[in-house]
Amino acid sequence: MSPAEQAAGEQTRAPGGLIIFLNGTSSSGKSSIAAELLRILDEPYFHLPVDAFHAMRTRQEMPPEQLNAVLHNTWRGYHRAIAGMAAAGNNIVMDHVLSAEWRLRDCLDLFVPQDVVFVGVHCDRAELERRERGRGDRPSGLAARQLGQVHAHGLYDVECDTGRADPLRCASLIKEFLADRPTPTAFQRLLDKRRG
């Protein structure tokens, strides 16, 4: 590619899209908030939940060590798919569970910090357990096991409690935040903290 072609390509490249990063335990209400966000946001957004990536995987039985490797690669691929969609100029609602520290580190390495709105989706243990029983598609106690790690990093741009506010109220809170996003973002502060 000639320098002129390269320069022309850079001029037509779309600016990065915004990533609304919903982080919370299983059954915390992330997907319900995402559905409301898609309904009320003014710009086009894609809801890309990590569960959709897991649902695409083959259902064959595999030994635990192979399954662990496949799961790890799925999460890594998910992060890169989000980064790629955003780099192409798409706005994303990301629905994830940061129940392992490496997942946050991976996202910090991949995402443009000023293009991430980091949202903590909270819910108390009793309500999580009630929702889990009602869903019937999650192992009992999964959300409770995730509670200790999911919010361990401590910093968010926006936080909501789905035990106290319905999904529309949570989505509205996020939409209000988008109108005047302060800097540095939570992602930038986490990245700075990591770099020391």
Image (cartoon, grey):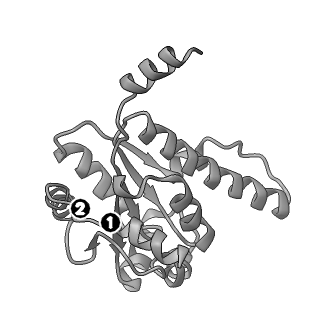
Q: Residue furthest front?
A: 3
- Judging by the rendered image, the residue that carries numbered circle 1 is 185
Residue 182 in which image quadrant: bottom left
**Residue at the location (54% across, 66% down)?**
104
Residue 136 lies, in percent from the top left, at: 50, 64
Circle 1 sits in a helix, a strand or a loop, which is it? loop
**Residue at the location (19% across, 45% down)?**
41
Q: Horizontal placement of 148 versus 21: left or right?
A: right
Q: Amino acid at mark 1?
A: Thr
Q: Is residue 129 above or below residue 109?
A: below
Circle 2 sits in a helix, a strand or a loop, which is it? helix
Residue 17 in which image quadrant: top left
Mark drawn on residue 167: 2
Residue 97 lies, in percent from the top left, at: 50, 65
**Residue at the location (29% across, 69% down)?**
157
Which class describes the residues within 10 Å of circle 1: few (<14), some (14-19), or many (20+)? some
Q: Amino acid at mark 2?
A: Pro
Whether residue 137 is visible here, answered yes or no, is no
Pick the residue in front: 5 or 163: 5
